[in-house]
Image (cartoon, helix red, strand yellow):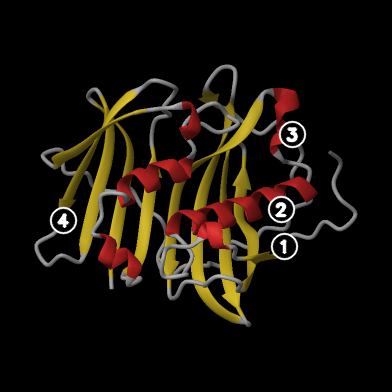
Amino acid sequence: MPISPNFTSVLSKDWEINFTQCTPTGFLKYTDLCNILQLTAAAHSEIGGISFYDMQEFHQAWVLSRMRVEVHALPKWQDVVTVKTWINSLENSRSVRALEMYVNGKKIVGCETYWAVFNTQARRPEALALPYEHFELFPENRATEEGFSKININHEKEAIFEKTVYLSDLDIVNHVNNVKYLEWCLDHVDSKRIMKQEVKSFEMNFMKELSLKDKVVIHESEDDDHTTATFSITKGEKTCFALELHWK
């Protein structure tokens, strides 16, 4: 698709929270929060001419490598949220994108994401084949208090669950969707802490893709003062994903 005449380097998009996106408390699930953020990023890439559809002409797609989300509050059922997004950096095969969520003009979520251009045939990163110079970059305008980082993995963590990748776990790029990793881990968190919205922030590292019928193991550890929980997902001897949860 060509660059939209309505293209702007900073996009604001409204979403109404529906009941399928909420926990029994009526507040947005953390997984659906990530979905809304990702859909907003996709909408911005579409009007800017670097969407999945555009990139598939060159067998390319954006894949998420790292993501940090800082949560001040969660929206509830029927709230209309505004998600604002812009790009901090974009060069060759890498991009850092910022996202913020607002309710009634008040910022409730900040997010920083790190994306890589991925060749869907060769299954490896490569330079973006499309022009992107029309995007104004905002390197100093950060959406989070802290940037994303490499999560330190404790390889002696307890194995808590074994999982096989099913068709429902895959996305259009034919690998496990990034939100699925988060969902698998949160299913093994104390539900009371989730319902009470005790998550202060969380960070995810996506290291290796998973495909249909892959068998994985989910591991968990918690620090001594119970303020941080770390999860990892392994396939054989290789770590594919890491999640770090920070509690309020």
Work out whether mark 2 precedes mark 4 in sequence or the reverse, and give the earlier one.
2
Q: Earlier in the sequence, mark 2 or mark 3?
A: 2
Amino acid type at image mark 2: His
Q: Which residue is mark 3?
A: 53
**Residue occupying image coordinates x 28% and y 60%:** 191
Q: Residues within 10 Å of mark 1 (few under 14, many from 20)?
A: some
- Residue 66 place in picture, x, y as percent: 44, 47
Marks 1,2: beta carbons within 8 A:
yes
The residue under the point 15% across, 56% down is 222
Q: Is residue 222 above or below residue 238?
A: below
State how far apart marks 4 and 1 are (Cα).
38 Å
Q: Secondary structure at mark 1?
A: strand
Q: Position of residue 58 (x, y in %)?
A: 71, 24
Q: Tell me the quadrant of the picture where the N terminus can be found.
A: top right
Name the residue tied to disc 1.
11
User: Residue beneath label 2, please?
Assistant: 44
* Mark 2 to mark 3 CA distance (whole Å): 13 Å
Q: Which residue lies at the image location 58% right of the left edge and 56% below the top edge?
A: 36
Residue 222 numbered tag: 4
Question: Residue 139 falls in which quadrant of the image?
Answer: bottom right
For marks 2 and 4, give the one nearer the viewer: 4
Residue type indicated by callout 3:
Tyr
What SS does tag 3 mark?
helix
Whether label 2 touches label 4, CB < 8 Å: no
Precedes in sequence: disc 1 or disc 2:
1
- Does label 3 or label 4 sit earlier along the sequence? 3
Is tag 4's residue or tag 1's residue first in the polypeptide sequence? 1
Query: Badges 4 and 1: C-beta atoms under 8 Å apart?
Result: no
Q: Residue 140: in sight, yes or no?
A: no
